[in-house]
Every structure is written in C-alpha cells, then in structure tokens.
Image (cartoon, grey):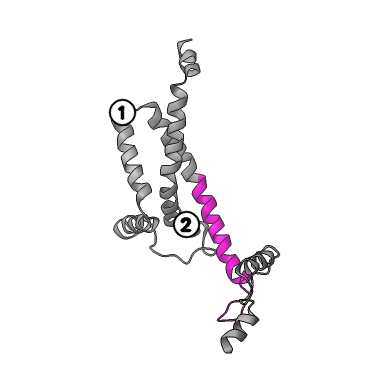
C-alpha cells in the first residue's frame, strides 16, 4: 500500500513513455523536479556544476582542436615512420578509458613533477592563475581523449587532398 501510494504520488504508475514525455516537458520549461532525499529543487544544485563543466569544455576545445588539426596536417605531409609512430601512440591513447588517462596525467604532472595541484578548490575563487591551474589537469585529460579522433580525420582529409589530381596539377604548375 505504501509502495502504491509512493508510485501514484510521483507518477510512476503511468506508462514509461508518458513519464518520459512529462519529464521532458517539465525539463525544457525549467522545472527539473525535486531531490528525493533532501526534497530540494534540482536545478539550483546542478547549475553551478554546469557552469564549471561548460568552462572546462570550452577551454579544452580551444587548445585540443588546433593541436589535433596541426598534428594531422604535419603528419599527413610527411608520411613514413613518424606517421606510423604517431598513429600507434594516438590509437593506444584513443583506446584507453579517460579515467586511466586522467590518472596517468595526475600521477605524472601533479605527483611526480608537482606542476599542478592534485585536487583544487580554486574553481570559481582564487586568483586567475589558480583558477587556470585548477582546469589544466581535467582539460588535459579530456583533450587527450579527443585529439586522436580529430587527428585521424584531419590526417585522412589531408592525405586524400594531397593525392587528388587537382593538387598534383597545381604542384606541377
């Protein structure tokens, strides 16, 4: 009886598709619901983390995309042993789970070389340098996960373009 009351109170007795569409409608309108344990609104709890996540994503894209494109173009122009070595390293990097890459980055740069803090509370506070330092390890971890894919696409496009007839004709002129 208690379980049925709870299900009716939270709309869990309705079909799953109806529950999802109802949740989606409320979510889009800004009503993200209440937490079950603390009975607080969810949105004010999530938004500060969302802001930091957005900053991290933008920072990561700002450096990782240009690095991956530059690497793809450079390696595609000079195919040979370097191309194969970079391919192997980046394929292994792409195959590693991000938590393994993050752990390796943290051990190397924060523990061994002590260049960055292992953990930081400077996000949203502290000096600009401290805030930037707080983002370096997470950004590096995310960027190293993205670089192999962008590099592979860039390399393939450049290799194809360099071997196209119009490129050879332009070089001969």
Give the image location of residue 70, x and y in percent: 44, 35
Give the image location of residue 24, x and y in percent: 65, 64
Q: Quadrant of residue 137?
A: bottom left
Q: Nearer the viewer, residue 27 or 4?
A: 4
Residue 125's place in the image compared with 105, above or below, is below
Q: Secondary structure at mark 1?
A: loop
> Neighbour class for label 1 at 10 Å: few (<14), some, many (≥20)?
few
Q: CA distance from mark 2 to mark 1?
A: 36 Å
Instruction: Point out which mark residue 80 bears.
Output: 1
Give the extent of the magenta segment: 35-62
Kindly identify the residue that appears in the image at 38 percent across and 47 percent down. Answer: 94
Q: Which residue is mark 2?
A: 135
Taking the image as shown, residue 83 lies to the left or right of residue 33, namely left
Taking the image as shown, residue 168 lies to the left or right of residue 105, namely right
Q: Residue furthest front?
A: 15
Taking the image as shown, residue 110 lies to the left or right of residue 147, namely left
Kindly identify the residue that appears in the image at 28 percent across and 31 percent down. Answer: 81
Residue 147's place in the image compared with 4, above or below, is above
């Amino acid at each position: 009886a208690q379980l049925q009351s709870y299900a009716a109170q939270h709309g869990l007795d309705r079909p799953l598709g109806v529950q999802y569409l109802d949740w989606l409608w409320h979510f889009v309108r800004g009503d993200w619901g209440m937490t079950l344990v603390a009975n607080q609104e969810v949105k004010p709890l999530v938004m500060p983390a969302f802001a930091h996540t957005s900053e991290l994503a933008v920072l990561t894209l700002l450096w990782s995309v240009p690095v991956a494109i530059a690497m793809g173009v450079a390696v595609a122009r000079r195919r040979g042993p370097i191309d194969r070595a970079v391919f192997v390293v980046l394929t292994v990097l792409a195959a590693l789970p991000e938590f393994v890459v993050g752990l390796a980055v943290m051990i190397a740069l924060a523990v061994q070389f002590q260049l960055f803090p292992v953990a930081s509370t400077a996000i949203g506070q502290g000096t600009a340098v401290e805030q930037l330092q707080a983002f370096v390890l997470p950004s590096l971890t995310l960027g190293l996960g993205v670089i192999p894919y962008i590099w592979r696409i860039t390399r393939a496009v450049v290799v194809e373009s360099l071997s196209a007839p119009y490129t050879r004709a332009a070089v001969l002129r």
